[in-house]
Each structure stands twice: as structure tokens, then as C-alpha cells.
Amino acid sequence: MAEHTQTCIVLNDVTVASQDIEPCGDPRICLVGSLADDAETQEAAKKFNVPVVTSETGEEYVSDSAFCTYFVLSDFESPVFEELDKAGVRLLGKPALIELSANGVLTYTRRPVFCHVMKDAVLVFTGFRKKSEVCRLLKLVHYMGGSVKNEIIDTVTHLLAYSSTGEKYQYANTFNIPIMSEDWVHAAWAHRDEVGARSTTDAMAKYKLKVFQNLRIVLVGFQEEDQSQMEDLVTQNGGFNTTLEDQQATHVVLEDQTVTEKPPDCPPKAHVVKAEWFWTSIQMEAPPSETLHLFEELNASILSPRQMFSSPSTPGSRSRRRKRLRETVQHLAQDDSSSALPSAPASSKRRSSVGDLAFLSADGSFLDDTASTPNRLAPPTGSSEQTPLSPPPVDLRQLSARQRVFHELVKTECNYVSILDAIEKVIKVPLENNSQSGGPMLDCQELRYIFGNLPPIHTVHTRMRDDLLHLAHNWMPDASIGEIILKYSTELEKAYPPFINFFENMKEMLQKISSERPRFHAFLKIAQNKPECGRQSLQELLIRPVQRLPSMSLLIDILKHTEKTSPDHLALEQALDKIKSVMTFINDDKRKTEAKLKLFEIHNDIEMCPPNLVASHRMHMSKVDVTELSDSCSGRGDTLTLFLFNDVLEICKKKSKYNSIKSPSRANLHALKSIKTYKHLEMMNLAHIKRIVDIRETEDCHNVFALIIRSNQELKERLFTFTLIQDDITKSTFLKTLCRTVANIACRNDVENFLVSMDPHHLDIETSDVSLTNALSKALKFATRTGRKVSRAFSFNKSPSKLKRAVSTDLSLSGTPPTGGFAHPMATPTSRRRTLKNV
């Protein structure tokens, strides 16, 4: 389209801009249709100081050559507009007139302008095939004050594309020209009546062209889980999943790790690309050029090692070739061994079998070209020789048992450090790059949470690997392996706990982010396919530090093959003890950390929780759900939760989900998430628990127990009666844990003295009655009172008859009870009934 040069002239004190047309007379504004009675339009027209006329259709002013008339309409989709447009007059919309009135400049052009939503926008179209569709979009752009070019030039601001492919698409993507969909034009047109609206606002950015917009993609060779996930991503990003039978398919994506040949029935016009193209598209939020990721079949002329030495010759010829191959490989192995181990004995002259090839290298390969290895580590102080970053090639048959196990230890350490290197270079460093395409995928806090505890481990193992490699390349019979391990044991003890303690939390966070952010998930998929990662996911790589220290059990085998007279024997024993000590420390530290995290989690889930519940010395021990049978805490029948810590018992009431919200409507979902599960009732010091009463199980009485409580400020005991309603923990287990914890607080060894058992039916309690709660409460109050009487009897009363009348025969306790507790009395059934009547 030809460009129009714009000039400005002044007519009757009014500035008028012109584009390739000369003014035909004095300017005049004609308000057409409903705008004749529109006060806002009339006010804007008056600001130009030109004549203003009104008309129903404007036809009577079309042929008036005395004036240069600007026809202002409220709608560009009416018959009136079509008739005036055919006449070739100057047409403006109400929004355009109002915006022009702010500057007092009347702009006229050969194209009607309804509004300025696309003012200063210069577009290029690509990919559209229907002429009617292109014409419609072109008109809308012009109506909104925009312009369209045929080719991308410096002034182009946007590319309007039908699909995510083509040369113009790749050019715009390379030079960061916004690529928009046709919905962007329609959305901008929907705002045509809003004065001041623009198509370049942030709210309009959602109309950028989707990654796979209108692409028809075929996925071949993927596992079921990956296939389903990729199909969802295709749909979410504007594409269509199709099959090889679809001749209109645009892309065939092959899993190049499993598919070795191009499918014979590929659509002729489709791009056949590797899976890397798919994941790179998701990560970059734009498909890269297909030429960079084309699928290439394995050349049939490139033979495998077995095929290289096979031919259609006679069997005798093949046999001679295999014989020469074995002799050549054996000769190379002997040369490498003699150079690596100058003191090793010469090889036997016997012919080597194919099975002997396994001894050629610790890596199991035929040839280890260490002489040309470019990567070398710095030598130790005082040495001028550099050490390669890989174990030396050796013939394991010529090594001692001790040296063979050591060689395996060196190899595993090198592999472990290479995994840490891959995490650092392939994943961590690119994620830390803030200038990555599409913006950062993780923020600083997330990066620190996932990778922050890894560098100390990486550093200490890199140094340990260097020392082990130096020892392997400079092996001496009296070399000390244990000293190297001991040298780094303290650093290992410091480096591992922070990583292992938060590994599960980090793994959950990684899974959550990966599922919520397609770009990050695609980045991990691309990294997984790189050779450095060995097709292992980030989660699989990150679990290696957790597994590393236990795998150092190879030191045990080295110790077994080390003479007790060797100086290294004692060092290895100390190294093994230190490694076990480090693992024990890590496990203990992990348990403590988990307990601390649990403490914070409990505190945050309890409404009105005392702040002092969170303390450095406090650890969570157990948790049970109970129903209260007494009125000491909340009320009979209420569901409570008991959190047992090492020094206190937190008693909470379990809240209803809709406790503070009348209706769980959609508007209240956010409020539901913030509701806490429990409400604080009492934080009980375990030192105040004087007795723990276990009510024996009967047909109608299950999981009932009670606590006798008295603090130093209280004159009387309080009785707490509960029924355990939890299935995953038994009453006996919880009561034993509670007794042990109470005994620890009291610094006593007689744990059993804090627990007393009672048989409800021996106390004449009707447990099958609906008043079971009251009956059990009265029974336990009776036990409390008899306990006080027994205490006084032992101290002051010397009459055994009162003691017999006071206590049940089934109430037993061994040892000396504390003040206010239970004794070890005897009572007859008759005296028991009399006592119950008195109660």
C-alpha cells in the first residue's frame, strides 16, 4: 500500500491536517443521525470554530463543494455509513472527533477513521488465506487509526499472524516484534466507543499469538503420561492434536530417543522435528525455527561395532577378523596397563578370551583415551604434574583386591561430582540468568530454596574427588585412603544436614512449580535430554546427595583387603566410624528439624494458640483425636485434639469447616482456606499430671482413659476423661508414650507408677446406658477421692478398715505413689458398694 504524506494547513483559523488531498473549501462538520442530539458530540464540534450542521443521512451535503465537510457518525456498520463511504467523503466516528477536539486539529484522510484505538500502530499480516477475512481485518485496522504494510520494515510495530509458523513469524520473533492474533483486532474494535482506549495496553497483551496457534501437531513415540501431558499443552496453546492420516498436519514431533526412523506415512507438507522443538517452544513461548530441530534418521551406512567387523564373507574369514580384533584390543590394554602401572608384572602370553574384555577398564569400555583427556585438575602443592579428571585406564586383573575396590570408589566419586556439575551448569546457572527469553522462570527465593543447600556439597566432593584422582594416578602400595576421607569428614558433617533436612519440602515445591508453570517444566524436559544429565530428571539428580554417603560403604571392602599392619588400616577404621557418625548426626538432625517444622505447623493451625508453644527445646511427640467425657475442657461430647510435646500437652477443640462462614459459596472459598483447624483450650504442663488412668476394655466401653491433674496453685485435683476416636494409633501406645514423657519431666525411672488400670463394671457402672458419660465421670471421681483417702491413711490413719472401705480391689498400683495419687489398697465388694452410695 502506498504511503500518504501528511501536511498541515490552516483554514479560517482552524488547523487541518491533510493526506494527499487538497481542501475543497472551508471546513464544516456534519453530525449525522443520532449525534445531532448528542450533547457531548456537539460540545466537541464547537471547539474547532467551524460551522456545524446536522442531518439524518448527510446526503444533502455530499455534493456541496463550497465546504470541506467532515461527516461524524455513531456507527460504521450501518447503511448510512455505507452510502457515505461509497461517495468518498471524509468520515469520522464520535470517539475520533472527541480526541481530535482536545488538540483543536481536524485530520482528514482518504480512509474513514472511527476511533484512535490503534493510533500509531503499523501492522503486517501473515498466514491468512481467506481474502474476505483479510479485507475485514484491514478495514477494522484502518477504522481504528492504524496502518498496514506488505513487508516488515523499521516502522512496523506488530505482526498479525494466523499461525505460529512462517518466515515473517520467525523474523518478528527474532527481533522481538509483538506477534498478535486476529482476536486482538476484534478485541480492540470492541473498545471503539471508549475515548482514549488503546490496543497497546497491558490488558491487551493476552491476545498475543499462542505458541501453537492453528498448528496441527502429530506426536509419535512418547510414553502415555508424556503423550497426555503434551496433548494438553498443544490444546492450551492454540494448536490441534491430529494423526499421521491428516494430510493437513503441520508438524510431526518424534521422540528421538526411541524412534529411529521417520514414519513412512508422514504428511508431505509437515515438518518432522524432534521432541526438543516442542519443549523449546513451550519454554521460549514461541516455536523456534524447525530447521534447528529437524529429525534425522540414523544413516544405515553407519554400522554398529558388531556390524563394522562383519561381512558377507566366509565363516573362516569372519573368525580370523574376530581373532585379530581380540589380539589388537588385548595388545592395547597391555600397553595402557604398562604405562599406568610400571611395576605391574608382564601379562601372560595366553590367548585372551572375549570374557576377558570386561577387565580392560573399570568403565567397561574397550579403549580409554586418557592420554588425550583435555580436562585436568590442578596438582597438589609442590607438584608440577596435572592430574586428569577421570580415573586411569587399568587392567583389573593386574590390580590387587584393595586397589580394585579403591578404583571403584574413585569412579563412583567422579560420577557423583559430574552429576553435581550437571545440576550446576545445565540447570541452576541458566535459571539464574535474568535475561532469559520470556523472563525468569523462578524467583530468587525459589532458586535459593531448591539449589541453595547444594553448593557446599558440590565444593567438598569436588575437592575430595581431586585428591582421590591424584592418589589413583600416583598409586603407591602404602597410600592412605582413609586420611583423605578423614580430611573432609568435618565438612561433610556441615554440608549435608541442610540439604537432607529440607529435601522432601524441596521436592514437593519442585513438583508444584513444575505442574503450575509450563515454561519451567519444558526447561526441565530440555535439560533432561542433554547428555550431561543422562536422561535423568532434576528430581532424580537431586536425590543423589541423599544416597551418596550410604554408598560410601565401599570403604568397608577396602578395609577388608587392607592388612592390619598397614598404616591405612587404622585410618580406614577411623574414616568408617566418622562416616557412620556423620550419617547418624544427619539422621538425628533431620528428625529434630522435622519436629521443629511440625511445631510451627501445629502453631499456625491453632486459633488463639499461645506464642510460647513454639520454643527451642520443645519437640512434638504424638497427636490423638478424642471425645471429651467430662466437663473439664470444652464439654461432654465435644471432639478434641491432644498434641503431646516433650513438656506440655496442648488441648484443642476441632473446629467445623464452616464454623465462621454461613455458606460455602464460591465467593467464600478464599476465606475457607484461611480458616484454622483447631481452637486453643488449654496448654497443660506435664509436671501437673499426677496420674494416668486406663479404663479397661469391655464390650460397651472402648478406648476410655483419664488424667488426674493438679498444679501447685490448685488445692484439688481435676479430672479429664476422654475416649480415643483415632484408628491409626492405639490407646496403649499413646498412654505408654504419655507415661514415658511425664516420667522424664519428673526425672523418674518408675514409668509404670504413673499408670493405673480400672475395670468399669466392677464399679457397678451401667456402661450400656445412655448415661455412659456421667457414669464414667463419677467412677473416675470416686477413684480420685479414694486415692486422697489412701494417702491420708498411710500418713496419719492407722485403721486398715477405712482403707478397705475406700478403694476397689481392682484398683492396683505398684511402688510408692506421689502425693495426691493412688495407693495399693484392698477393699471388699460390700464396702465398695457402700462407698458408691456415699458418692
Image: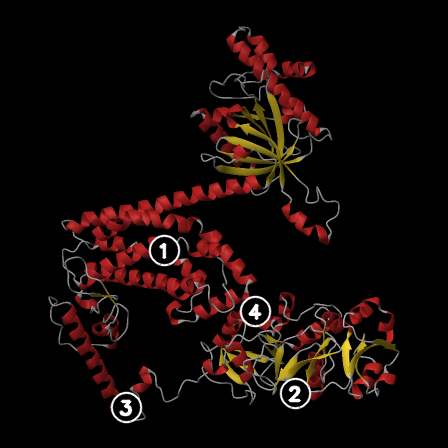
Measured from the top left, where is residue 270 in percent x and y?
A: 55, 86
Between marks 3 and 4 in the image, the one whose residue lies nearer the viewer: 4
**435 vs 710: above or below:** below
- Look at 72% across and 28% down and name the residue there: 771
Looking at the rendered image, the quarter that the C terminus falls into is top right
Would you identify the image quadrant in which residue 346 lies? bottom left
Dot label at residue 129: 2
User: What residue did someone put label 4 on?
Assistant: 229
User: What residue did someone put label 3 on?
Assistant: 315
Give SS at disc 3: helix
Badge 4: residue crowd in 10 Å (few <14, some 14–19, many ≥20):
few
Q: Name which residue type carries label 1.
A: Pro
Measured from the top left, where is residue 197 in percent x and y?
A: 69, 68
Residue placed most toward the observer, 437 or 321: 437
Q: Name which residue type carries label 2.
A: Arg
Q: Name which residue type carries label 4.
A: Gln
